[in-house]
């Protein structure tokens, strides 16, 4: 009897251990990979996705194909849509991908000569994506420059906490920003855009609509977006005066490299943003600019700006004048800005306070600080004021005729996808 009892107990213990092992292993066992070679196979695979599943697009040309996926993975088991071989899946023309749900990854896809409103869109219909990632992808256009009223984008970010990293974007020929962050009330935002290479973009024939990145818009400019744009390379992004157009609050722009960019990082709308430790290398290219400040509570610190040829709006550092009772799409007065510990080397127009945008822009910066900046300027004026500065603190700024030995060297670290383009 005792032997039988012990034997039964041993079986029960083994059964219990097997059950717990089964419930912990089974979800991973369910995860599957599906290779698809056409949209019909893709649609079928996308209907029954579970956390951890992977859809693999077969190498080759996917022309005029619109793919949509709405599914939910988890942080531990994301759903992945990837190329069979990174950079060998080509989506061309009207081909596009729309993603909604949570914890999905797009990996290794190459969009060529897009002719749709968004090559990559992080929403399906009105449902946005959350906690999703676009990595090792590229969107490029090699067609001749043209003007279009379609306001197309390469990529549109909706939802919250999405990431775009190690991607390459270049050659956009139509109106519309290369990348847009769309914001809505009660939406967290908090996207991260990092380690990407934003390559050459030719100037538009119109004044506006050629930004490389726009974060928000006039209507959403008072939303606290809290996005982070960091460790990206911007190279010859010359679509318009604003390379980056900030139109929301609480964003951080740090450790980016701007190389021969005929435009500026512009804090156009919104408040409380931070611009820090970026490098602006003008390389004496035409119209290269730095940082333009509009609005309240911005911090601009630790940036390195060298050989910039722009003036006016495209000065190395520019404080704009404000409009009394400005509309959302106007110019808000600069208030409580702190511009400190930046280094300017051999720039045509260094620091400009009081840039005018017409007769209504009359309000000078107030309660702001310009301090501890180093300006190496053999020819140009170090700080130019076109308005009263009695409500600013301007102190401890150093001006040199020759470059001191301790000026920080410019970084050259590459960014972009890991596969060869």
Image (cartoon, grey):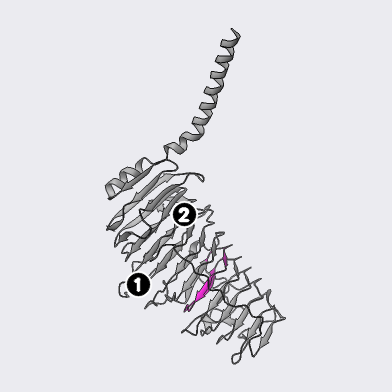
In percent of width and height, residue 220 lies at: 50, 61
Q: Which residues are magenta?
A: 247-270
Residue 328 seen in the current view: no
Quarter of the figure with residue 280: bottom right
Would residue 191 appear left or right of 151 to someone viewing this image? right
Q: Secondary structure at mark 1?
A: loop
User: Does residue 226 show up?
Assistant: yes
Mark 2 crowd level (few <14, some 14–19, many ≥20, 10 Å Cα): many
Q: Which label is found at residue 410? A: none
Residue 29 in the image: above or below residue 384:
above
Residue 91: x %, y % from top left: 32, 59
The residue at 52%/31% (across/down) is 21
Q: Quadrant of residue 34?
A: top left
Which residue is found at the position 49% from the left and 85% from the top?
Answer: 284
- Within the magenta stretch, is there residue 251? yes
Residue linked to disc 2: 133
* Picture disc at residue 173: 1
Taking the spot 31% from the left edge, 43% from the top edge, the residue there is: 44
């Amino acid at each position: 009897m005792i032997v039988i009892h012990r034997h039964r107990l041993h079986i029960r213990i083994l059964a219990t251990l097997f059950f717990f092992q089964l419930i912990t292993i089974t979800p991973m066992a369910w995860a599957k990979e599906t290779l698809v070679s056409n949209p019909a196979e893709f649609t079928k695979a996308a209907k029954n996705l579970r956390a951890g599943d992977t859809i693999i697009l077969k190498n080759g040309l996917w022309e005029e194909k619109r793919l949509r996926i709405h599914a939910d993975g988890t942080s531990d088991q994301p759903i992945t849509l990837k190329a069979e071989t990174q950079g060998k899946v080509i989506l061309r023309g009207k081909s596009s991908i729309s993603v909604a749900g949570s914890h999905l990854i797009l990996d290794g896809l190459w969009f060529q000569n897009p002719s749709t409103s968004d090559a990559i869109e992080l929403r399906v219909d009105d449902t946005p994506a959350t906690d999703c990632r676009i990595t090792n992808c590229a969107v490029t256009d090699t067609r001749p420059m043209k003007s279009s009223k379609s306001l197309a984008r390469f990529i549109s970010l909706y939802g919250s906490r999405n990431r775009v990293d190690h991607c390459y974007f270049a050659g956009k020929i139509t109106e519309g920003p290369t990348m847009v962050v769309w914001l809505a009330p009660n939406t967290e935002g908090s996207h991260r855009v990092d380690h990407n290479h934003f390559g050459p973009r030719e100037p538009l024939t119109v004044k506006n609509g050629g930004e490389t990145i726009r974060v928000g818009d006039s209507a959403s400019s008072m939303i606290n977006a809290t996005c982070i744009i960091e460790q990206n390379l911007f190279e010859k992004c010359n679509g318009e005066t604003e390379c980056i157009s900030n139109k929301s609050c609480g964003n951080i722009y740090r450790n980016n490299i701007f190389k021969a960019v005929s435009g500026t990082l512009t804090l156009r709308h919104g408040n409380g943003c931070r611009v820090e430790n970026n490098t602006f290398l003008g390389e004496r290219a035409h119209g290269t600019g730095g940082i333009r400040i509009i609005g309240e509570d911005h911090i601009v610190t630790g940036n390195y700006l060298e050989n910039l040829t722009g003036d006016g709006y495209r000065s190395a550092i520019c404080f704009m004048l404000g409009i009394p009772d400005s509309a959302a799409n106007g110019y808000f007065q600069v208030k409580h800005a702190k511009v400190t510990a930046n280094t300017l080397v051999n720039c045509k127009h260094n620091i400009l306070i009081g840039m005018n945008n017409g007769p209504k822009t009359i309000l000078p910066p107030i309660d702001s600080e310009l301090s501890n900046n180093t300006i190496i300027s053999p020819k140009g004026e170090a700080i130019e004021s076109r308005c009263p500065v009695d409500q600013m603190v301007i102190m401890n700024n150093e001006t040199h005729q020759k470059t001191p030995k301790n000026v920080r060297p410019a970084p050259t670290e590459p960014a972009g996808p890991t596969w060869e383009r």
